[in-house]
Amino acid sequence: MIPFLIYVAIFLLSFAVVRGGLRRYFTRRDFTSLKTVTFGDESAVRPDRAASVISVLTIFLLWGAFTGSKWVPVHAPGPFLGDTSFTYTAEAADGSRDDAVVHARVFRLGETVEAPVVAPGAGFAKDDVVTVAAWRSALIRADANDTLTRKDGARVVAIDGQPIAPGGAVITDAGRVAMTPKGTLNYAPPKGMQMEPIWLPPPEAVVSRVGEIAREGYQNFTLWQHLGWSLYRVVAGFLLGALVGIPLGYAMGLSDWFRGWFDPIVEFMRPVPPLALIPLVIIWAGIGESGKIILLFLAALWIMTIAARAGVSGVRISKVHAAYSLGASKWQVLRYVIVPNSLPEIFTGARVAMGVCWGTVVAAELVAAEKGAGMMIMVASRFQLTDIVIMGIILIGIIGYGIDILMRMGEKWLVPWKGKG
Amino acid sequence: MSELSIQNLSMRFDLPNGSSVQALKDVSLDLKSGELMSVLGPSGCGKTTLLNIVAGFLAPTEGRIVLNGHEVKGPAAERGMVFQQGALFEWMSVRDNVGFGPTMKGMARAEKRQVVDHLLDVTGLGAFKEKAVYELSGGMQQRVALARCLANDPDVILMDEPLGALDALTREKMQGLVLKLWKETGKTIILITHSVEEALLLGERLVVMAPRPGRVHREYRLPFADIGVDQDLREVKKLAEFGDRREEILSMIWDMEEEIMGRTEGAGA
Ligand SMILES: Nc1ncnc2c1ncn2[C@@H]1O[C@H](COP(=O)(O)OP(=O)(O)O)[C@@H](O)[C@H]1O
Ligand SMILES: [Mg+2]
């Protein structure tokens, strides 16, 4: 909740600063800047690059601040570390009371720590010692070393002067102290506002993990092999899907019989999410490469079929008429008019298909695989290696984005006439 | 030489809702070789339908088209078509668009180049040969369309409002070009237009069609195309006879439009 409020505050504040203050000195002078009607004119809405930069920085800042990153100057309060103590009051069976101190030493998880050494103190209740890792809690049988224990009818009745009963809890300066129904104390030091690394590691941990896995690999394969295998599956599945889907789409756009025959199949398969096919594909083809490629083939197939069909039906009839009037045969009309005219549609379809395939391959690898980006993060999550999981997600996102950019560049280069008809 | 004969053409469109539209009824026209016939009429009178049947894109419900003694069964290179707009191939350069017909025929490279270069020069596109067609203005695109049609050397050229999408000034220039090309090539041309002036200026013959059902209403023989071949078209428009004809035909079409309006209003009431 607090990170979200900070995020909203940064959003509003940077808007006020950039648009209200700085922009005055960096006004763009071009045609669009002279438009007076911009609200409702979509073409006048251009991304404010300052906002994009601040947006990305904010995410990293918040990530770092709430994980105690070394890269970020400001931090949210971290968990308590060091020595602290609280007092408990024990009451003997005869009603007499005595106070004793619990000395707690809170350490960073993964570090080794020695318990503090203290004198037991006077009275029937004796001082206790406990070590506990940050974000964790520790059970304390406070009466175990006392002269009068539970068996003698003694029980803890207050912590730092606040009364406590079995099943209850009190908040002290040293942290939260709860009591189990049997009378054992459960001590949890203050957690602060930072995330535990097991939930969200700091950015530098993720980066160093990228380096480590790139060098040493993970689960028998290097990072590049994992990513490379995922990419290979996507490309192979997509190419097969395009190889079958595009001719099928053309046939459906050109022939009554093909349209009639395949319409029910395509229309039925189109809304079936490829993920729903994973179990069936695993049953049929196992979890090896062929199963994955079949799955991606199916994911790409319908998209490419529909794109090619739309490309054919999108051809302006006057172009086809013109070609026939210029003496073209059916084949020539297909080759010189219908195919080039449908290329923009096919490229759009290919972009969609590549996106779907990339998502599907990761999901399929999550379910079952020996290698691949999805398998890497799935295994890592089983061992609570959150930094690998986050690294994997970021790399998957970057690759997906990269694929889309490449497709767009290819489109610009190969079909410069898109939208110009 | 080419004789085009449109014989007792009728076309009825049966609509899915059971009703039908009589787009053409008993239209007969004969064109001599090298004749330029313009066709006028209120919209919906079947002009495009007529042209599509002649081009071979539609089969008539009755009647037939005969060109050079052969009945027309479908589209063919002997009947070229110039559309209003959007029929160029935007994935090809200007040169490849114009060379499309020769390429389909498998004409030799050098010969094709010669034909295409010549036509591009004639149509004033010499400077745009390697450009993409979508980089050209509307008027330039129609020049490409004309050149593309001529490169195929058809017997008959069919034009469906070829200049309809152009601005008035460009249109005037293009009218001069059409007239020039017609005289130079001696092609038989059917030109559909919405503009009475254009029909008068370019047509040796002018057919006015009437709607519902689409039929030939009046035919004229006109001298203006011959006068305009070596004169400024603006001067032709100033002739008294031209003005009279224009008024006559305008009011004729005006009456037809009125009648259509009246009929639809009556039906709506
Ligand atoms: N494919 C079609 N289906 C049904 N009606 C049509 C079709 N094509 C044309 N028509 C009808 O035929 C008539 C003539 O159309 P058209 O030849 O386009 O007229 P024009 O070109 O003179 O404006 C119109 O009433 C039109 O609605
Ligand atoms: Mg029309």
Image (cartoon, coloured by chain):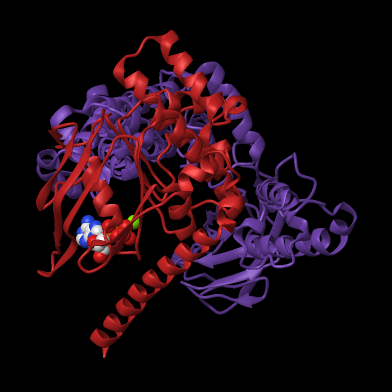
Q: Nearer the viewer, residue A305 or A4?
A: A305
How many marks are shown on the rendered structure?
0
Q: Is residue B73 above or below residue B107?
A: below
Residue B114: in sight, yes or no? yes
The image position of residue A17, as x and y in percent, is: 83, 61
Q: Position of residue B207 (x, y in %)?
A: 32, 56
Quarter placement of the N terminus of chain A: bottom right
**Chain B color in figure:** red
- Residue at the image position 47 percent from the left and 21 percent from the top: B116
Q: Residue furthest bottom?
A: B269
Residue B211, quarter of the rendered image: bottom left
**Residue located at (31% from left, 79% from top):** B259
Compared to residue A45, the image places residue A39 above or below, namely below
Q: In the drawing, does residue B2 fall left or right of residue A156?
A: left
Looking at the image, residue B57 sits to the left or right of residue B113; the answer is left
Q: Position of residue B121 (x, y in %)?
A: 56, 25
Colour for chain A in the figure: purple
